[in-house]
Image: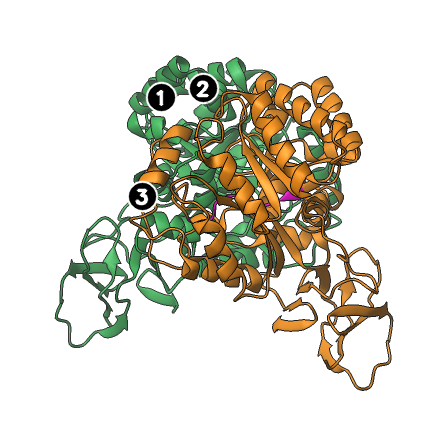
Chain colours: A green, B orange
């Protein structure tokens, strides 16, 4: 493969302009005025170079993206949305390989190189979603990690546990959970079951937690205890964790310490008006924070663009981040934080890292987040996709 | 002036495609297959036609838009932001006619045809802001209404009251207020003073109210009482009104009834993580709701694009609006609601209305808000500005 030399960009975090030499899908050298006469030259002078964006929480299998506008038809409760989803997914041809592919192409054009997606697993859908996502992912240069997601309950939906296991056997990278108390009604058994699966299959674990207040806080303790006891640190993520935004400072602090010590990451998208975890405090405690859209144009809601810089803006905005340093935390969540939550290796802007890059016209991280401008260049595994 | 025929668009609210014939700055006819052989023909087939977007709350005079990125430098309190603003505005050349013009041009490109902007008035700045906004507004085809805004207090900042009056004498259309209790420390005298000015000069009144909870609710009562007593209905707007989002249902209901009866409008931008007034409930009670960005790229914060469809998305999103009908309320705030708050006449999509139009590729209002797509056409006073 011909080498590529990105000339004159400003790699995020380096503090000075530097060329980046890419060969065989890897970053080979980073430095000023690199000499590589045989390389293809791409001028990115003055532009900000970021590692590929990481979408750490979405639902590709549900998307209606790329099709005509579908007016939202669900009631105003979580139960209403679950019921509407079940009732209408067949009518609308969900999951659709074409829709998933369309969304992945859009994400890729925005510079997303890695995606973690929660795929519905239930006795009616079986593993159809897993297969559809796999097929679409094979067509687009984005690395997709699936979570076998019991959207309609595990204990309350017989047959689901077996299907989660089947999904893991088929190569799905992570097992999911959903409101162990609020939805599945037996948090201890729910968590023991999914932690058991994660341990047995060497899988990641990513748990949807909408349960609020003290109930959610207690479930966060249960998750932290199990992560620690089973030594699953670095492989466990809690998604949404609305409760965190509703607790007093002291309780937030104790939970943050627990997450950091046990290796529990958080994924948030700052969606709708739901409480946002205290990102700055969590990061200060050493907790990994990832970022994702949640649903994009689906039966759960019509919003979402697939642009992770825009999503980082939502996270920064809802966090009332105004200074550059604060806003940069949101970009970190959409890049390095997501990479850590997903367990990616070779991620970054150093020699030896995979050449997954996105270039934007921005003075720095804060401007990139706030303005989320058109991408100047997207590179995946060393190939220029968009320039 | 040559007539223009917009062919085949779908005027919002009409339910069917219709041509729009524009002449001498006005909409002359709206209907299917209009015959106007001499007219310039513009094909907008299948696209959604909206009335010009109304930015009902911004701060043009403060903007740094169009210049290089300025890292945010204020502390984390309202007092800190006020102090930072005072300290740095001279250094950064605020107000700048060029920056204001740049932002107005951006707003116009996004289809905004009317703007209400709060211009700082204080003994140090005098009326420099008013003059700068006036000069910039003269260069861009956007109708700009100014509010003489006591950003640094009225009673607590001697000389300001006189300057507010001077601004009104000079033709500024509205007088502002700012947290009569929380900032200016004497809500009754503050409100009596600005209501008196509004009455005396036939001006509109637009009051910033960040004061929260029961304090803010009580101030909303004071405002409602004065609006009613002085017969100023239709000329009074409360901006932000964070308190409304913090009250129980019964208190919200009582205030909503009072606003509707007295003719008090609300302007909200759903900014940062601050509470959003209950838009659906307020509209159901008959309260006029307008929408605006608040600051755009200024010393108070780096966010904001100037796109009122995107801003409507923020309002819909924070209101957890998912259905088309609900999301449409946000677009109403960015159009008809803003027009009513600003006291515009001849606003709309009917024959006889001013030909201020924006055309977007969207199936309907909800899609226009959610995706806030590129504008297909912008027309102001019958002139095509962007096509």
On screen, residue B178 above or below B11: above
Q: Residue at x 86, y 80 (%)?
A: B35
> Which chain letter matches label 3?
B
Image-based side of B82 in relation to B372, left or right: left
On screen, residue B169 above or below A98: above
The answer to whether residue A296 shows anywhere in this view is: no
| Residue B88, numbered circle | 3
> Which chain letter matches label 2?
A
Mark 1 to mark 3 CA distance (whole Å): 37 Å
Mark 2 to mark 3 CA distance (whole Å): 44 Å
| Residue A256, numbered circle | 1
Q: Position of residue A132 (x, y in %)?
A: 57, 52
Residue under label 2, please give it. A220
On screen, residue A103 above or below A122: below
> Which chain letter matches label 1?
A
Q: Are marks 1 and 3 on the same chain?
A: no
Q: Residue at x 37, y 65 (%)?
A: A376
Which quadrant of the view contains residue A224?
top left
Image-based side of A193 in relation to A159, left or right: left
First reached walking from the N terminus: tag 2 or tag 1:
2
Give the mark toward the camera: 2 or 3: 3
Q: Secondary structure at mark 2?
A: helix
Q: Position of residue B249 (x, y in %)?
A: 71, 20
Q: Are marks 2 and 3 on the same chain?
A: no
Q: Secondary structure at mark 1?
A: helix
Image-based side of A108 in relation to B351, left or right: left
Q: Position of residue A106 (x, y in %)?
A: 51, 59
Q: Residue at x 79, y 34 (%)?
A: B284
Q: What secondary structure characterizes most of the magenta part? A: loop
- Whether tag 2 and tag 3 are in contact, CB under 8 A, the answer is no
Q: Which residues are magenta?
A: B290-297
């Amino acid at each position: 493969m011909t080498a590529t030399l990105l000339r004159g960009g400003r790699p995020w975090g380096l503090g000075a302009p530097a060329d980046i030499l890419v060969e065989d899908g890897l970053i080979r050298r980073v430095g000023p005025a690199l000499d590589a006469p045989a390389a293809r030259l791409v001028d990115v002078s003055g532009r900000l170079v970021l590692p590929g964006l990481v979408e750490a929480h979405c639902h590709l299998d549900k998307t209606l993206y790329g099709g005509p506008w579908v007016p939202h038809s669900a009631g105003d409760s979580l139960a209403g949305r679950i019921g509407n989803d079940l009732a209408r997914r067949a009518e609308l041809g969900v999951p659709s390989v074409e829709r998933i592919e369309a969304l992945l192409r859009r994400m890729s054009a925005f510079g997303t190189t890695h995606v973690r997606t929660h795929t519905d697993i239930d006795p009616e859908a079986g593993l159809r979603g897993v297969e559809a996502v796999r097929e679409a992912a094979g067509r687009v240069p984005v690395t997709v990690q699936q979570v076998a997601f019991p959207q309609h309950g595990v204990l309350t939906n017989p047959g689901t546990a077996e299907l989660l296991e089947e999904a893991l056997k088929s190569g799905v990278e992570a097992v999911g959970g959903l409101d162990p108390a609020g939805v599945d009604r037996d948090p201890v058994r729910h968590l023991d079951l999914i932690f058991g699966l994660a341990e047995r299959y060497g899988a990641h674990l990513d748990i949807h937690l909408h349960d609020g207040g003290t109930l959610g806080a207690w479930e966060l303790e249960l998750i932290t205890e199990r992560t620690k006891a089973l030594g699953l640190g670095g492989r466990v993520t809690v998604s949404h964790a609305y409760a965190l935004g509703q607790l007093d400072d002291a309780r937030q602090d104790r939970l943050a310490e627990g997450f950091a010590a046990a290796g529990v990451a958080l994924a948030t998208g700052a969606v709708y008006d739901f409480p946002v975890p205290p990102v700055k405090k969590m990061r200060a405690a050493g907790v990994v924070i990832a970022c994702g859209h949640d649903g994009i144009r689906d039966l759960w809601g019509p919003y979402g663009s697939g642009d992770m810089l825009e999503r980082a803006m939502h996270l920064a905005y809802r966090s009332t981040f105004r200074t550059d340093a604060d806003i940069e935390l949101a970009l970190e969540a959409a890049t390095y934080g997501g990479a850590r939550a997903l367990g990616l290796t070779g991620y970054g802007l150093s020699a030896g890292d995979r050449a997954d890059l996105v270039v934007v016209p921005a003075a720095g991280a804060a401007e990139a987040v706030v303005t989320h401008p058109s991408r100047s260049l997207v590179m995946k595994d060393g190939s220029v996709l968009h320039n």
